[in-house]
Amino acid sequence: MTHPDQDTLVDVALGSSAPAAVTEHVRSCAFCAAEVAELQATVRAVRDGADEVLVEPPASVWAAVLSDLDRDGSAPPGAVRRWSRGLVAAACAAGITLGSLVTYALTRPDPAPAPVRLASAELTPLDSRAQVGEADLVSLDATMTLQVRTEPLDPQGGYLEIWLINRDAKRMVSIGMLPPGTAATALPVTRQLIDQGYVVVDISREAFDDRPEHSGVSLARGTLDLTAGAR
């Protein structure tokens, strides 16, 4: 028996009734079995993309496809390969699905920019070199934040406040608190503050006494290394 034509193979792939001789041929012919398997995969793509709007491709597209098939020897010797309406519709649906993915890749938003670490500081107690935390000065979208992480520090009934102390050791500003029960926070800072020399990170224990100044009890301190830059 000669190879069934393309329309007959499409019917087999779709599960339509076919002559027993055709069914037996497909079972015994590796080429036709492969053709049916490819068509069934295309049918599944059509069903998965049933909501897609099908667009008839230009005739030149299919002419180029058929030309490539003939050139690469895909067709069996003497066989006349014809694209049926069912196969064209299936190929269109599969093409639309791929096109949707390409469109998404081209139009999806750019990935969010990664934060840039400008400087870091190891935080240690004033009377020890044992590191109990770290602080990172981070820039993202022209906004600077100080990210502070520490081991659990005991506020002893008060709270933990984070300061930036100037290099001259005479001036300091409070930039926020370490939330109760947490060991990390991120606080906004300004470039002007850093440029003026406020680069020493200090965590103090404060009492609820309505006094805004530093208590004098520092639990951890470290200097931002601005020369290291981003790593």
Image (spheres, rainbow, N blue to C red):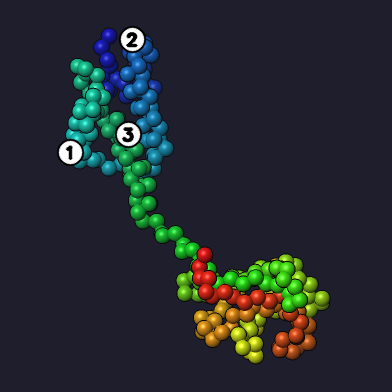
The answer to whether marks 2 and 1 mark residues whose Cβ atoms lie closer than 8 Å is no
Question: Which of label 3 and label 1 is nearer to you?
Answer: 1
Can you tell which quarter of the image residue 59 is in?
Answer: top left
> For residue 21, which numbered disc appears in the image?
2
Q: Which residue is mark 3?
A: 90
Instruction: Tell me: residue 107, above or below residue 222.
Output: above
For label 3, the crowd category at 10 Å Cα-Cα, with few meaning under 14, some 14 to 19 and many 20 or more, is many
Dot 2, how many residues are within 10 Å of its Cα: few (below 14), some (14-19), or many (20+)? few
Question: Is 19 rendered above or below residue 143?
Answer: above
Q: Residue at x 21, y 17 (%)?
A: 77
Numbered tag placed on residue 203 in the rendering: none
Q: Secondary structure at mark 1?
A: helix
Give residue 169's position: percent from left, percent from top.
65, 87
Whole-number angstrom distance, CA of label 2 to CA of label 3: 26 Å
x then y, percent, for residue 116? 50, 67
SS state under label 3:
helix
Q: Secondary structure at mark 2?
A: helix
Q: Residue at x 41, y 59 (%)?
A: 109
Q: Name which residue lies at 39% across and 22% down.
A: 15
The N terminus appears in which quarter of the rendering? top left
What separation in Å lies between label 2 and label 1 (alpha carbons)? 36 Å
Q: Quadrant of residue 93?
A: top left
Q: Name the mark nearer the viewer: 2 or 1.
A: 1
Towards the viewer: 155 or 61: 155
Count residues near mark 1 (Cα–Cα under 10 Å), then give few for <14, some for 14-19, many for 20+.
few
Q: Which residue is mark 1?
A: 60
In front: 48, or 130? 130
Compare marks 2 and 1 and give the one earlier in the sequence.
2
Mark 2 and mark 3 in contact? Answer it, CB < 8 Å: no
Labels 3 and 1 touching (C-beta < 8 A):
no
